Image (cartoon, rainbow, N blue to C red):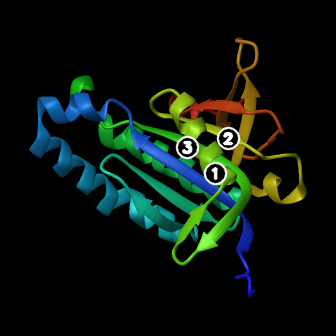
Amino acid sequence: MTSERIERKLAAIVAADVAGYSRLMAADEEGTLARLKGHRKALIDPKIAEHGGRIIKTTRDGMLVEFASVVDAVRCVVEIQRGMLERNADIPSEKRIDFRVGINVGDVIVDGDDIYGDGVNVAARLEGLVEPGGILVAGVGPRPGARQAELQLRRSRRPQRQEYSATRPRLSSEIERRRASSFGETGG
């Protein structure tokens, strides 16, 4: 018997979806779809390409993206969430498209153009836990490469919560919640 070798690799996996997508579609299918396509074309897909990501698959309201580097994944997602804040600034709240994003660093099985495994499953679970406009990261421990991202985490007043502000990162092995509303803040 010849057994086929299973290809595995370590990757930073991003799972993202639109918060409240069913509600948005029920209220305005054509407008929601047009806005989502516009965000993808003008912001999301170019940022993913700029940071070396690969779109594995898209769903009606979400996507799965693979990066070789967690630093690139975090930079990309932060820039997308910042961009969405700007793009949504003049949109009524009931029509805003807000993304929830989970990022996990883990081992994946490669099957053609697709990836599978616990690394993917964890990213998808994280995305389901995060608030609209936020990012939840797991599987990131302190290491020199992670310090290269242009972000800095600061402790908020609420326990067990960290938020982004600009400049350099301090990424811990804990799962850390980050809100897009604080991405542009400076200082600590």
Does residue 169 appear left or right of residue 67 in this picture? right
The reply to whether dot 1 and dot 2 touch (C-beta < 8 Å) is yes
Q: Find residue 163 and report its horizontal and vertical position in percent.
A: 66, 29
Q: Earlier in the sequence, mark 3 or mark 2?
A: 3
Q: Residue 147 bears which disc, if any?
A: none
State which quarter of the image contains the N terminus.
Answer: bottom right
Count of picture labels: 3
**Which of 188 and 76 lies nearest the eye of the viewer?**
76
- Residue 188 showing in the rendered view: no
In the figure, residue 185 lies in which quadrant?
Answer: top right
Q: Which residue is mark 1?
A: 74
In the image, what residue type sits under mark 1?
Val
Report the residue at 61% width, 52% height from top: 120
Left or right of residue 154: residue 65:
left
Q: Secondary structure at mark 3?
A: helix
Mark 2 residue type: Val
CA neighbours of label 2 inside 10 A, class few (<14), some (14 to 19), many (20+): many
In this rendering, the answer to whether 109 lies above or below 40 is below
Q: In which quadrant of the rendered view does residue 151 lie?
A: top right
Q: Which residue is mark 2?
A: 137
